[in-house]
Image (cartoon, rainbow, N blue to C red):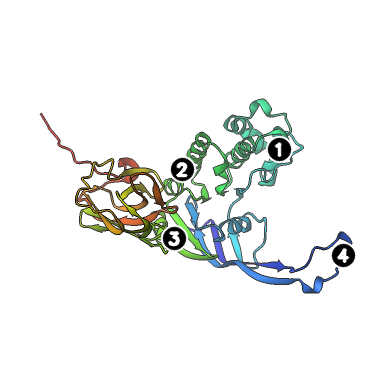
Amino acid sequence: MKSILDIEHISKLFLISHQGLPYLSLRERLTGLLRGREKQEPFWALQDISFSVAPGESLGIIGKNGAGKSTLLKILSRITTPTSGRIVSRGRIASLLEVGTGFHLELTGRENIYMNGSILGMRRAEIAASFDQIVDFSGVENFLDTPIKHYSSGMQLRLAFAVAAHLEPEILIIDEVLAVGDAEFQKKCLKKMEDVAGQGRTILFVSHNMDAVTSLCKKGVFLKQGRVEGYGDIHEIVRDYYDETHHNSMTLEKGAVRAIGIVQQDDKLVLSVSYEHDAVIDFPNLGFSIRDMFGHPLAGTNPMKSQVDMRPYKPARAGHIEVVISSPKLMEGTYQLYVWFGDSRRNFFETKDPILFQVTKMSTGQGRNAKLDGYIIPECQWNFF
């Protein structure tokens, strides 16, 4: 089967200007004075990007900010041209990259539906056939004959997504723009994209919401500094992304906490923290929270909540704490650890970025699916009568 989209050795070069000039008046700028001092630095936003997308495939594109995701989508949408390489598309492409893209603010919602559909390559008869569905999905029926300059950003987003999703393009490209919508609308959009994918159309989806990416996409591309770092099964790509950007330990030069680490030992998790403070700490109150890889809290506690007996501890300025978490019963996967540390009166430290760690073969359970079953495997007693 032929691929519907081939990205072949795409590179994109931008020239960044470093003027190094004093403040110039309008006349000086127009006459080009001191222009010779302007310097330009080459910046490769994309370098030799190659992959293919099969018909009906949902592909997630992930990476840190600045990895080149949006630049790639703009090239695919023909908003900008690549410096080198080529794109072979065997179907019509509809893209939703920014709120208001393809809209004219002075035109009404009704007029913009027809104009935006025409930009996407649709005939007027095709647009008319889907018009009622577009209006119903967008929820802007009462404002249909109002210029969209009076729409909120959320209303513009709903209308733009409705047009792109209902005019049946062979390839639908969605950027992080869905983050503008509320939770209910995001859920509605994801359901619509699942329906679109189920109809055999192709979706390219960029998002920092890994939950949404893994639920919608089966394959993924991991971009790093303008290059393809990984391509394949979406769950493996997400794990590679987390492994690249996070680690299961942290060493700090300043602050009350100097080192944090978490490791798996058979069916246990061992959390270790070293601390040092200018004042004597009478009660080293270490709290932790374990979350799934999308940030949803799963478990956590601290000595006060767990009613830990502190009698063996002697107040000190420095020390080491080890917490053995017996049988947490976590499913295999990637998890986030957050830590905060203080004494009996206040907190001295709190992690800003999570520490990520892997859990492997903690349970012998077969056929489990985190999406359906959750992340914790409870101990149960089954009685049959």
Q: Earlier in the sequence, mark 4 or mark 1?
A: 4
Q: Nearer the viewer, residue 118 or 216?
A: 216
Q: Earlier in the sequence, mark 3 or mark 4?
A: 4
The residue to which callout 4 is attached is 28
Residue type highlighted by circle 1 = Asn
Secondary structure beneath dot 4 equals helix
Residue at figure coordinates x 47%, y 48% from the top left: 209
> On the rendered structure, is 173 left or right of 222?
right
Secondary structure beneath dot 1 equals helix
The residue to which callout 1 is attached is 112
The residue to which callout 3 is attached is 245
**Total numbered circles:** 4
Residue type highlighted by circle 4 = Glu
Dot in front, 4 or 1? 4
Residue 25 percent across, percent down from the top left: 85, 61
> On the rendered structure, is 139 left or right of 255?
right
Q: Nearer the viewer, residue 358 or 340?
A: 340
Residue 91 percent across, percent down from the top left: 59, 52
Do callouts 4 and 2 mark residues in contact (Cβ within 8 Å)? no
Do callouts 1 and 2 mark residues in contact (Cβ within 8 Å)? no
Dot in front, 4 or 2? 4
For marks 3 and 4, give the CA distance: 46 Å
The disc placed on residue 198 is: 2
Q: Earlier in the sequence, mark 4 or mark 2?
A: 4
Q: Is residue 75 above or below residue 191?
A: below
Q: Residue furthest bottom?
A: 36
Residue type highlighted by circle 3 = Thr
> On the rendered structure, is 59 left or right of 256?
right
Secondary structure beneath dot 3 equals helix
